[in-house]
């Protein structure tokens, strides 16, 4: 199950058997500024994975903000979700809503120039 409201995504799954995984994850985000990276999005991922409490934050500059799912996947794997399940279920439509909300919050438009050196 997943629910989205601007600035917040909640994803919950209950294990179906002992080989399955459970998680209850909240992903909060807001526009922020980093002195060295500039304007971007501050993310807070909190909740539990396999009953283990988690609370992680990460900042992505404007040019990288769309890549938040990669960070979420890596954090989920660190807390015990196996790689083959670490895409946190099928929340694609909810991620699409987040992408759009982030785009609006950062005033990003298709074709905006980016500093390619940020990706080297």
Image (cartoon, helix red, strand yellow):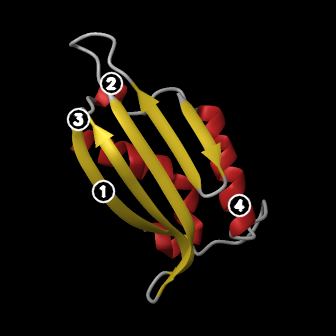
Q: Splitting the image into 4 quarters, where does residue 81 fall?
A: top left
Q: Position of residue 78 (x, y in %)?
A: 23, 45
Instruction: Judge left or right: residue 44 versus residue 111.
Output: left
Q: CA distance from mark 4 to mark 2?
A: 29 Å
Is 57 above or below relative to 100?
below
What whole-number distance in Å separates the C-alpha atoms at marks 4 and 3?
33 Å
Question: Where residue 95 is drawn, which disc sits there?
Answer: none
Graded by Cα atoms within 10 Å as few (under 14), some (14 to 19) or many (20 or more), the crowding at tag 3 reads: few
Cα separation, mark 2 vs mark 1, equals 22 Å
At mark 2, the secondary structure is: helix
Q: In the rendered image, which residue does mark 1 sit on?
A: 55
Position of 73 with respect to 38 (left or right) is left
Q: Quadrant of the C terminus?
A: bottom left
Residue 87 image-quadrant placement: top left
Upstream in sequence: badge 4 or badge 3: 3
The residue at 28%/17% (across/down) is 20
Labels 3 and 1 touching (C-beta < 8 A): no
Reading the image, the residue beneath label 4 is 103
Callout 1: 10 Å neighbours few (<14), some, many (20+)?
few
Rounded to the nearest whole Å, what is the CA distance between mark 3 and mark 1? 13 Å
Task: Point out the frontmost of discs 4 and 3.
Answer: 3
Residue beneath disc 3:
51
Distance between mark 3 and mark 2 Cα atoms: 19 Å
Q: Are marks 4 and 2 in contact (CB under 8 Å)?
A: no
Please report whichever mark, 1 or 4, sits nearer to the chain's N-terminal start: 1
Q: Which mark is residue 84?
A: 2
Graded by Cα atoms within 10 Å as few (under 14), some (14 to 19) or many (20 or more), the crowding at tag 2 reads: few
């Amino acid at each position: 199950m997943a629910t989205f409201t601007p600035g917040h995504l909640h994803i919950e799954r209950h294990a179906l058997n002992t080989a399955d995984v459970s998680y209850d994850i909240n992903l909060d985000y807001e526009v922020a500024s980093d002195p060295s990276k500039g304007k971007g999005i501050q993310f807070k991922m909190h909740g539990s994975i396999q009953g283990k409490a988690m609370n992680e934050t990460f900042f992505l500059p404007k040019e990288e903000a769309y890549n938040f799912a990669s960070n979420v996947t890596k954090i989920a794997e660190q807390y015990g979700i196996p790689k083959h399940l670490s895409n946190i279920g099928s929340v694609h439509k909810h991620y699409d809503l987040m992408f759009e909300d982030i785009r609006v919050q950062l005033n990003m438009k298709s074709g905006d120039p980016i500093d390619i050196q940020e990706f080297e």
